[in-house]
Image (tube, rainbow, N blue to C red):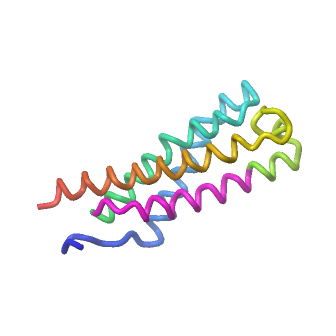
Amino acid sequence: MSRHHRPPRTPVFLLALGASAAGTVALGAAPLLLTDNVWWLALASVPSLLAAGFLLGWYAREPEPLYGAVLGTLYFGIVAGVLFGAELAEALPDPLPGLATGDSTFFFVWPLLILVTSFVGSMIGGKAATRRTP
């Protein structure tokens, strides 16, 4: 652990979580409304989580993937809850991802995409901050 290391505080995690959710809505809402395909939300989460993970890594000044894991886990919990709630309210098509009934591909691939993206963002942000710090 370097002398410049500082673990992210709760406000930074909340900022990153809010930014990733807002970015997903901003990038994925229009395609979702136009096509009724929830995969657009999954794809919109990639740049949003990459940027949020970068923020956490930058703030910590350490390429630590644990910060990305925490971000990805919290993000998945919130967004999956919103998607299930929207499906129960019949605001989203059934089945959820537009696949055949009983197909769980969306909820298998999407969490992996979230974890990888948040890991990578955190690692890139930490590396960039350590290069910048003397």
The residue lying furthest to the top in this view is 34
Whether residue 132 appears in magenta in the rendering, the answer is no
Q: Is residue 87 above or below residue 60?
A: above
Q: Is residue 40 left or right of residue 18?
A: right
The quadrant of the picture occupied by the N terminus is bottom left
Question: Seen in the image, is 18 located left or right of residue 84?
Answer: left
Please name the residue shown 38% across and 55% down the image. 122
Measuring 62% from the left and 42% from the top, which residue is drawn there? 25
Tell me the chief SS of the magenta region: helix
In this rendering, the answer to whether 69 lies above or below 84 is below
Residue 82 lies, with reference to residue 45, above or below; the image says: below
Q: Magenta region: which residues?
A: 62-82
- 4 left or right of 54 in image: left
x, y percent for residue 59 = 33, 62
Q: Nearer the viewer, residue 19 or 64?
A: 64
Q: Residue at x 69, y 41 (%)?
A: 106
Spot occupied by residue 109 in the image (x, y as percentages of width and height): 62, 43
Residue 39 higher or lower than 60, as above or below: above
**Exactly how many numbered labels are in the figure?**
0
Percent x, y for residue 125?
Answer: 32, 53
**Left or right: where 63 falls relative to 84:** left
Quadrant assignment, res 133? bottom left
Q: Which residue shows up at 25% across the image and 51% down it?
A: 128
Q: Which quadrant of the figure has residue 60?
A: bottom left
User: Residue 40 at x, y = what percent?
Assistant: 64, 33
Image quadrant containing the C terminus: bottom left
